């Protein structure tokens, strides 16, 4: 993922800021559905400013939220063991 550029060119986005938002989103969705107000709060904390001030954009917020959801669906940070059901060894039609 390429580093997003803030709307306000005076502001910069550090790697720590970029990493903290998905982590906070993940912690939030463990307990409850993610509301737009919670997403805005996470983004304000992570990027040290508001969307109106140019610290972040809603598109960036939704992209981070989708990236975190996909990462969780694909197994998160730790590998998970997948158990497949046993296959029937007899040929079909017997």
Image: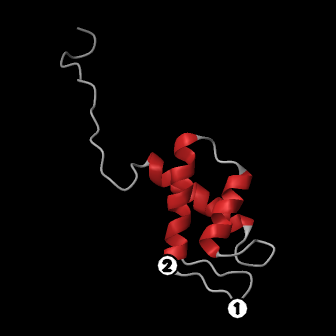
The quadrant in which the C terminus is found is top left
Give residue 87's quadrant in the image: top left
* Local crowd size for mark 1, using a 10 Å CA cut-off: few (<14), some (14–19), many (≥20): few
Which residue is at a point 50% across and 60% down the rendered structure image? Answer: 23
Q: From the viewer's perspective, is residue 44 above or below residue 81?
A: below
Give x and y (percent) for residue 72: 46, 49
Residue 53 position, x and y percent, is: 79, 78
- The residue drawn where x is 53% and y is 61% is 22
Q: Nearer the viewer, residue 78 or 74?
A: 78
SS for callout 2: helix
Q: Hey, which quadrant is residue 4 in on the image? A: bottom right
Q: Which residue is mark 1?
A: 10
Q: Nearer the viewer, residue 17 or 80?
A: 17
Q: Quadrant of residue 33?
A: top right
Report helix, strand or loop for mark 1.
loop
Residue 33 vs residue 83, the one in the foreground = 33
Q: Residue 38 appears at what percent x and percent y?
A: 68, 54
N-terminal of the pair, mark 2 or mark 1, is: 1
| Label 2, residues with CA under 10 Å away: few <14, some 14-19, many ≥20 | few
Extreme residue toward the right, this view = 52
> At 28% from the left edge and 31% from the top edge, which residue is drawn?
84
Q: Can residue 6 be seen in the rendering of this structure?
A: yes
Front-most of residues 25 and 69: 25
Taking the spot 57% from the left edge, 50% from the top edge, the residue there is 28
Residue under pointer 2: 15
Q: Where residue 92 sits in the image (x, y, percent)?
A: 27, 15
Is residue 1 at least partly visible in the picture? no
């Amino acid at each position: 993922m390429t580093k997003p550029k803030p709307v306000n060119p005076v502001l910069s986005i550090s790697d720590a800021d970029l990493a903290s938002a998905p982590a906070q989103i993940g912690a939030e969705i463990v307990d409850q559905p993610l509301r737009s107000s919670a997403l805005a709060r996470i983004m304000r904390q992570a990027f040290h400013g508001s969307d109106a001030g140019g610290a972040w954009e809603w598109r960036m917020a939704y992209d981070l939220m989708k990236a975190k959801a996909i990462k969780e669906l694909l197994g998160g940070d730790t590998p998970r063991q997948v158990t497949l059901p046993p296959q029937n060894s007899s040929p079909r039609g017997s």
